[in-house]
Image: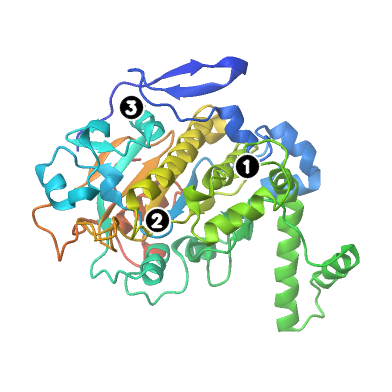
Amino acid sequence: MPDHRPEPIRPTTATGGDVVTEAADGGGRSGMSRRRFLALAGGLGTAGLLGAALGPRAWDGLFGGSPSGAAVPDGRLVLVTLYGGNDGMNTVIPYGNPAYAAVRGPLAVDPSTVLPLGEGFGLHPSMPGCRALWEAGRLAVVEGVGFADPNFSHFASMDIWQSAVPSGSESTGWIGRWLDRTSGGPLRAVGIGPTLPVVLTGDTVQGVTVPAGRLVLPGDPGEQALYAALSGAGLDRTTLLGQAAQSGSELLQVRTSLGPILDRSGATGARGGPPSGGPSAGATQGLAISQGGGGRAGTDVLSVQLSLVANLILAGASSQVYSCELGGFDTHTDQAPTQKALLAEVDTAVSAFVDAMAHDPRGQGTVVVVYTEFGRRVGGNASGGSDHGWANPVLVAGPPVRGGWYGQPPDLTRLADGNAAYTTDFRTVYATLLERVLGVDPGPFLQGSFPTLPFL
């Protein structure tokens, strides 16, 4: 497969010592300086500051060693889940294909506004930061990704993506099974959001999920002390009570380890300044995620989540997998303005995160994967939107990524009941990530053998 990477971008120094990413041809920027991005989660982008905030015992629990010399894994995987079914054809746009405008109709993006990637494809005009990543060779586009026999259900399709089992009969996630088989503790996989996603759920080990804001134990201080006492597991526990105690013990471990940085995030406004009253930034973002607010919430929902992840990675956290999420992509009506806002949010967050990873040795092995449960139908509906579809591109970004095109774009002249048919099994993406980021044989976690792709 040919290497489509263009010439690298030039880093440009801005005022105050911040660095922004700017294309060599004067094109788009990420829209957020590295300093401002890291400040969204409290600005703890250094090991020394975070070590001082956590204290030595909590540092050992989360980071597996001392702030100055902890050995942490090289490869880290960050999953960004877009809930609702993002319209991939208007994200990576085949504007050079005459069939695109013909079949999309009013939904087609004006070709004069598309950000060109070459070969007749380009990005949505709201994604200049991702275009800069492409020009830097740090963005891979995997085309036509999906699975056979789509059911077009949000819940069933997302369960399939997160379990990596197309039959829909598996209750564990592919990362959860990785936790099970590698004897990984809960802190090896951290989700940022209101609920634990299926992808981090194992049979015997669950990842942890934390809010992008304050993490508060239930009850008043006295009740919290009783809760802590109850959660001290002992040999005299019955099986059920022992399991409850273990669950509480793990929550206390998470509170001790992640609490200081989460508190900083929750006490910080959405733009990195002091809160202006009302719900905390973390609470607002939790609602935006769970209710599908996304870009319409205007609160940097994804940027704050990825900022928290970045601060943990740059501080030397031993966690290898992180999960972030953004809702609002079920665009049955008024798709154009909704997707414009959502993709701008994704673009700012992802490009700023990759920029932060690329400028620190601790972030060099970090890979970000952006996916959704399905694409949209190729033709629009009568409400200015699009309905549930099939194949979609997956975006992979980060310092170790070999940028370019992978997979095969769907043939727009040969649709399947109005849908772009899938050409790339989604498990080939997972196989590549398991083997080349997490360093394991993919077979046991995917319940089968699948080829890998050379984007890493």
Q: Which residue position holds label 2? A: 329
Mark pair 2, 1: CA separation: 21 Å
| Residue 139 in which image quadrant | top left
- Residue type at numbered disc 1: Ala
- Residue type at numbered disc 3: Glu
Q: Is residue 42 left or right of residue 446?
A: right
Q: Is residue 164 above or below residue 192?
A: below
| Residue 402 in which image quadrant | top left
Q: Is there a contact, CB below 8 Å, between mark 3 and mark 1? A: no
**Where is residue 283 shown, x and y percent of the image?**
65, 55
The residue at 8%/53% (across/down) is: 413
Q: Is there a contact, CB below 8 Å, between mark 2 and mark 1? A: no
Residue, far front: 383
**Where is residue 331 shown, x and y percent of the image?**
35, 57
The residue at 55%/55% (across/down) is: 288
| Residue 119 in which image quadrant | top left
**Where is residue 8 shown, x and y percent of the image?**
35, 21
Q: Which residue position holds label 3? A: 135
Q: Which one is in front, 270 or 151?
A: 270
Q: Is residue 82 above or below residue 406?
A: below
Residue 270, disc: 1
Q: Is residue 247 above or below residue 72?
A: below
Q: Secondary structure at mark 1?
A: loop
Q: Is residue 441 left or right of residue 279?
A: left
- Residue type at numbered disc 2: Phe
Mark pair 2, 3: CA separation: 27 Å
Q: Earlier in the sequence, mark 3 or mark 1?
A: 3
